[in-house]
């Protein structure tokens, strides 16, 4: 039975989640699912199996939060960039599956060594697990499903700043939990715990505190998905690609695309030596310019899917994508995060040390090997737009916080 069934049931209050879970996890061919960032209609919770960017991580395994995701340059805790719910048919333990991407917020760290500024982990749960009902819509009449009760357990303490495991407490009030001394200090000074420690807070103050803390994170957006269109636009796009290939050679290809429309603007491309990968990227992405994520999971047993590179330069070598540390299986491309997501994170684009990337490519264990209530680390590769390429215009939605 496809895992989408149970998800439909769990998320039946939201069309968006239905689309999301069906399409992201269970595509039967290599159609790319495009992810879009939207304001959540209702607060995102674990039992709706959310896909999202920013905010606090929502742990698939509620009893077992990740205990550390530190930047290896500044050594400070990183922030959740994206979490994607990506259930798989095989093996059974990947019935529920979430991939988490963490990222240091400090662009200066990325400039020093971007490889040390990301962490990707995978978490999985079988259909029969202590936390979520195994029932699906089709068999909800089932007696077994009716009588199913989630396990009762003491919720783990989570860091109030970043949402990772919080084994430390405020030394004064012992009411607030933290992952690290770093976040204790951040909460004390920036989120105002200094003012509220050992105080009874009003509802209004609680909102104020929550708001201050949320500003320390990337802005939370739900990621909803739709299959990339294969209609008239898709055919047209294919024809364009074929045409530039047939011209056989960079000069002719450049001539055929002297005017490259991107978004609402037309760029005159006078470079003869056009970056072919960038050209292809631009042709694909301009059809759906709001996309922030592309999900193209390699089907089990089928040929590897090629990501949509943003440049001919800076592709990973085989050694850059090592085999799974847990089981030794190959890691294959699963999804890429586009530069358009930067517009939604609530971080500045103008600062010298701002975050930047052309795309972030996530590679995961092809076999979805069992995680056994741990978090298995996966691999991320970053590619920048080449200097010769023309950058796509970035839209700045109203949602971007001007104060950050
Ligand atoms: Zn850092
Ligand atoms: Zn923390
Ligand atoms: Zn305190
Ligand atoms: Zn593995």
Image (spheres, helix red, strand yellow):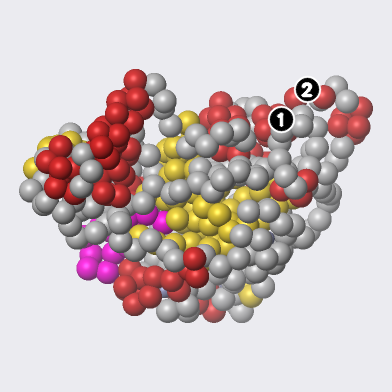
Which residue is at the front of the view, 70 or 292? 292
- Is residue 354 a member of the stretch shown in magenta? yes
Q: Main secondary structure of the magenta part?
A: loop
Quadrant of the rendered structure where residue 15 is? top right
Task: Answer whether labels 2 and 1 touch (C-beta < 8 Å).
Answer: yes
Where's ligand 1: which quadrant? bottom left
Which residue is at the front of the view, 80 or 212? 80
Q: Is residue 301 left or right of residue 363?
A: right
Q: Is residue 401 left or right of residue 321?
A: left
Q: Quadrant of the N terminus?
A: top right
Q: Element under label 1? A: helix
Q: At 50% from the left edge and 70% from the top edge, which residue is drawn? A: 319
Q: At 34% from the left edge and 20% from the top edge, which residue is drawn? A: 232
Q: At 20% from the left edge and 47% from the top edge, which residue is drawn? A: 249
- Is residue 144 a member of the stretch shown in magenta? no
Which residue is at the front of the view, 381 or 81? 381
Against 341, residue 228 (above or below) is: above
Which residues, given as a range, are shown in magenta? 346-360
User: How far from the left and from the top, in percent, is residue 181?
Assistant: 54, 79
Q: Which residue is mark 2?
A: 138
Q: Residues within 10 Å of mark 1 (few under 14, many from 20)?
A: some
**Residue 289 in sight in this render:** no
**Residue 278 in sight in this render:** yes
Against 121, residue 223 (above or below) is: above
User: How far from the left and from the top, in percent, is residue 3?
Assistant: 71, 36
Q: Residues within 10 Å of mark 2 (few under 14, many from 20)?
A: few
- Whole-Å distance between the Cαs marked 2 and 1? 8 Å
User: How far from the left and from the top, in percent, is residue 85?
Assistant: 60, 45
Q: Quadrant of the C terminus?
A: bottom left
Q: Which residue is mark 1?
A: 5
């Amino acid at each position: 039975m496809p895992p989408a069934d149970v998800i439909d049931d769990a998320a039946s209050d939201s069309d968006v989640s239905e689309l999301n879970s069906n399409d992201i996890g269970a595509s039967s061919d290599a159609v790319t699912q495009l992810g879009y960032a939207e304001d959540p209609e209702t607060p995102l919770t674990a039992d709706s199996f959310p896909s999202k960017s920013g905010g606090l991580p929502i742990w698939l395994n509620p009893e077992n939060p990740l205990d550390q995701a530190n930047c290896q340059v500044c050594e400070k805790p990183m922030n959740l960039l994206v979490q994607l719910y990506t259930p798989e048919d095989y093996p059974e333990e990947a019935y529920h599956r979430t991939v988490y991407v963490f990222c240091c917020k400090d662009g200066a760290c990325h400039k020093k060594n971007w490889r040390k500024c990301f962490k990707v982990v995978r978490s999985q749960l079988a259909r029969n697990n202590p936390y979520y009902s195994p029932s699906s819509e089709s068999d909800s009449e089932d007696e077994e499903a009716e009588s199913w009760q989630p396990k009762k357990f003491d919720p783990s303490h989570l860091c109030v700043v970043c949402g990772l495991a919080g084994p430390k407490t405020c030394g004064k009030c012992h009411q607030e939990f933290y992952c690290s001394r770093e976040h204790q200090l951040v909460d004390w000074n920036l989120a105002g715990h200094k003012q509220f420690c050992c105080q009874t807070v009003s509802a209004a103050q609680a909102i104020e505190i929550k708001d201050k803390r949320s500003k320390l994170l990337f802005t939370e957006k739900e990621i909803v998905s739709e299959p990339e269109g294969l209609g008239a636009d898709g055919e047209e796009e294919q024809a364009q690609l074929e045409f530039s290939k047939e011209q056989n050679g960079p000069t002719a290809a450049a001539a055929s695309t002297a005017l490259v429309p991107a978004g609402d603007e037309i760029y005159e491309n006078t470079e003869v030596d056009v970056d072919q990968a960038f050209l292809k990227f631009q042709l694909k992405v301009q059809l759906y310019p709001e996309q922030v994520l592309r999900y193209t999971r390699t089907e089990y047993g089928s040929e590897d899917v090629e990501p949509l590179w943003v440049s001919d330069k800076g592709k990973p070598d085989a050694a850059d994508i090592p085999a799974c540390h847990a089981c030794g299986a190959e890691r294959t491309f699963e999804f890429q995060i586009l530069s358009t997501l930067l517009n939604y994170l609530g971080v500045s684009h103008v600062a010298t040390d701002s975050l930047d990337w052309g795309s972030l490519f996530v590679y995961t264990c092809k076999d979805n090997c069992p995680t056994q209530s741990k978090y298995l680390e996966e691999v991320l590769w970053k590619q920048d737009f080449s200097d010769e390429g023309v950058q796509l215009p970035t839209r700045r939605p109203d949602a971007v916080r001007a104060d950050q």
